[in-house]
Image: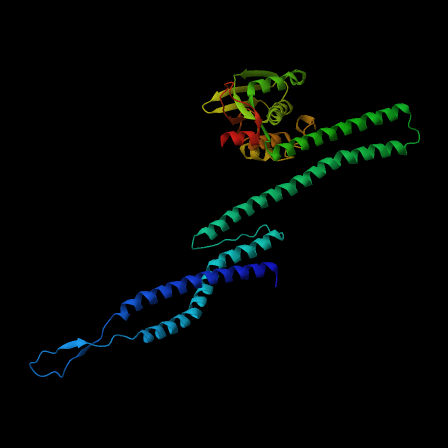
Amino acid sequence: MTTQTLTRRSLQKRLALAYAAGIYAAGTFVLIFVNVPLASVQETMPAGPASSGTVIETGPGPGISLPQLLTGSAVALVVLIPVALALGWYVAGRFLHPLRAITTTAKIISAGDLHRRLDLGEPTDELTELGHTLDDLFARLQASFDAQRHFVANASHELRTPLAGLRTLLEVALADPDADAEALRSVCREALALGEHQERLVQALLALATSERGVTRWDTLDLAHVVEGVLASRRAQATERGIDLAEHLAPAVTAGDPRLIESLVANLIDNAIRHNHPDGHIEITTRISGTEATLTVTNTGPVITGDQIQRLFQPFQKLAPDRHGRSDGYGLGLAIVNAVAQAHHATLTTSARPEGGLSITVRFARISSEPSLTSGTAEDRAGERE
């Protein structure tokens, strides 16, 4: 017999004893409540023989004797003991039945069958509500594990590709007995390019993992200032590709992790530059809208159908293996944007432009820009809210 079984049986025994004690106490109280009045009751017996036309006279007789009451009460209390225990055991078992179902199914699910659910029916009580909560938890765990397995498989493939290319490049160079210094230098340059490609991929994976970890520090920041800093390092790249940058930056103060929000802005702008066409256009807007600080990035580019939009926010998802003949993207940019938005409880809205390209809006919670606001860790801010 396992420890869990012993614990479960022990809990049922304790509940059964508690219910039996309550039933026994109630029975004892009822006997006392009934016996006390009976002890004072006097039997009335006829005083003489009744005759026709004669009124029957009655007089006090002997009451119910105390020994009789005590004997009857003792017998009733003795009989009540097994009855109370049986009722207590039955009631405890009925109350623990949903808990046993939860425990059994949870063991099966923890063993690896994440598709199972408790599916507790009626009646709706605290235990069935717990079962519904656990079903929701198991569903989220299943989705998380499925996404993790999918991500690991894709990451392994993406990391294996440059490694295989590098290995092939070096093996070919070593196998050529007539390779001169210039050929070896060319091989080294290609090897460095593959290494840089792999380094950028690893950095993107780290950025995605950091974003999915959540926000550990909340600082007051202005989205307009963040966009200005990112654009300063992207203007040359946009100019090289003939892409026009238009900015409409109004103060939009919010709170969050500056590094994560900067990563969100950088990936939005990089995505808009990378997936654009020559002589294209990018418009970046920050503003306050009601209780929200909004950031909008709109770009020209290829036509995207509505059913493809949600897929683009999953890791390693692209519209095509090689858009415009380039292979400088990994399919992680919008996944990072989505993860950062979720970590900050921001609303992410995406729409495909009929003439081509995307319009992506991120809505953060607006906060006041008064100097009294301070920055700090998530724990500090939680303490201030309390």
How are the residues colored? rainbow
In the visual, does 307 lie left or right of 181?
left
Q: Is residue 164 above or below residue 234?
A: below
Residue 130 in the image, given as x and y percentages of width and height: 49, 49
- In the rendered image, residue 343, in percent from the top left (x then y), is placed at 57, 32
9 relative to 267, above or below: below
The residue at 51%/27% (across/down) is 363
Q: Outermost residue, left direction?
A: 53
Q: Is residue 76 visible?
A: yes
Quarter residue 221 falls in: top right
- Name the side, left or right, on which 17 lies relative to 184: left
State the residue in front, 85 or 326.
Answer: 85
Give the quarter of the figure containing the N terminus: bottom right
The residue under the point 77% across, 29% down is 195
Identify the residue shown where x is 30% and y is 67%.
36
Work out whether residue 254 or residue 378 is closer to the camera in this orientation and state it: 378
**On the image, which quarter does residue 282 sit in?**
top right
**Left or right of residue 57: residue 170:** right
Q: Does residue 147 sit above or below 205 in this rendering?
A: below
Q: Is residue 345 visible?
A: no
The location of residue 291, given as percent across then percent down, is 46, 25
**Residue 84 image offset from top left, x and y in percent:** 42, 66
Quadrant assignment, res 257: top right
Q: Is residue 356 left or right of residue 325?
A: left
| Number of callouts | 0
In front: 237, or 259?
Answer: 259
